[in-house]
Amino acid sequence: MDIPIDYLAGRWLSVSDRPAGDPSQSCGSRLERRFLDADPAQQYCLFTPSTPRPRPPILVVVPGTSQSAADQVRSFVPLAEAAGTLVVAPVFARERFPHYQRLGRAGHGLRADRALDEILRDVRALNPGCADRTHFFGHSGGGQFVHRYVMARPNEVERYVVSAAGGYTLPDPHLNFPFGIRQSPDLPGFAPDPRAFLAVPGCVFGRAHGQHPGRGLSRMLRSDPEPGVARIDRGRRWAAVMNRKATSLGLSPPIQFSVLPVDGPVFGGTSRPSRLAAAAFDFLFRARERDTATQSQ
C-alpha cells in the first residue's frame, strides 16, 4: 500500500517510491514509518538491515528543513545494508518543533532532544542488544541539532558528523545558549560539560560552492544568520575552536574538518550513496574500526 512516510518542508513522501534494486526491499531488510505509543503524533523512519551485525550500531540521521526524514534514511540504505546497521530519522514537524535546530525553546513547541530520546528507547525495545552508544549525522539544520545534542548527552554518543550547519554553539561558558554553553532559560536543564562533549570524536564536512549558486542556495544565503561568512568557513572555524578548547583541557583534538567536492548531489538515492553519505559513513564506522585495528597491532 502506498502510504505517506514523512511530512517536512511542505511535502509528503511515500515508502513505495523506491527505485528498482533498492536494498531496503531485499532479503528481509525494510524501511518503515513508525509512531510512538506514548505520543502517536510523533513519527520516525527506521531502516532495518536484512542481517544486522552483532550488537548492531544505530545511526541517527537528522535532516534539515529542506530534506525529509525518508530521503535522509534512503541516502544511507546501501551502506547500512552492507554494514548491518540500523538507521533512524526523527520527524521534527514544524508545528511541533519550530526550534528543533537548537533542541527546543521554552514556550515555543516541544523539546526535540527529548523526543529523540523517546524514539531511541522505542528502537532499542524493538531491537534488543543494540550497541550502547549511538552514531549521528546531521545536515544543515540537522547538523545544528546534532552537535548540540552531543553537547547535552555526550555519554550516549559514539561519533558524529555535521554537514553544512548554518550556526554552531561555541564551547564558551560566558555566552548564553545557543551561542555558547552558558545556561539559558530558553532551554532548561541544558548544562553541558566541556570535558565530556570534547571527548566525543566528530567531523565537520564543508562543501565549496561555485560563484553562481542556484535558487535554493540563494534563498538559503539570504536567510542566513551570518550572511557575510560562508557555511564552510563557519564549520572550519568551529572545528578549530573546539580543538583549541580540548587542547587547553589536556584532551586530544576531537574534531576533523573535511571539504567535499562541489560536483555531484548532496544526497543520492538508495541505489548509490552520495559522496557526502559515503564520507560520513566512513568516518562514523570504518575510521573507528581502522583506529581500533591499528591500536591492537
Image (cartoon, rainbow, N blue to C red):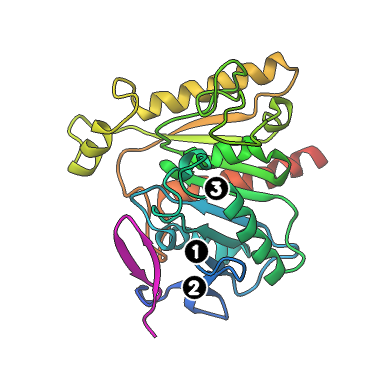
In percent of width and height, residue 166 lies at 39, 33
How far apart, in angstroms, are the residues tagged by discs 1 and 3? 28 Å
Q: Which residue corresponds to mark 1?
A: 77
Q: Which residue corresponds to mark 2?
A: 24
In percent of width and height, residue 116 lies at 59, 54
Mark 3 near mark 2, Cβ–Cβ under 8 Å? no
As drawn, which residue projects farthest toward the right? 296
How many dots with numbers? 3
Q: Main secondary structure of the magenta part?
A: strand
Range covered by the magenta-colored residues: 1-15
Q: Earlier in the sequence, mark 1 or mark 3?
A: 1
Q: Which residue corresponds to mark 3?
A: 111
How far apart, in angstroms, are the residues tagged by discs 3 and 2? 31 Å
Q: Nearer the viewer, residue 268 or 65?
A: 65
In percent of width and height, residue 240 lies at 54, 20
* Residue at image coords 29%, 20%: 228
Q: Earlier in the sequence, mark 2 or mark 1?
A: 2
Judge left or right: residue 130 versus residue 201: right
In percent of width and height, residue 28 lies at 57, 80
Q: Nearer the viewer, mark 1 or mark 3?
A: 3
**Where is 199 relative to 123, above or below?**
above
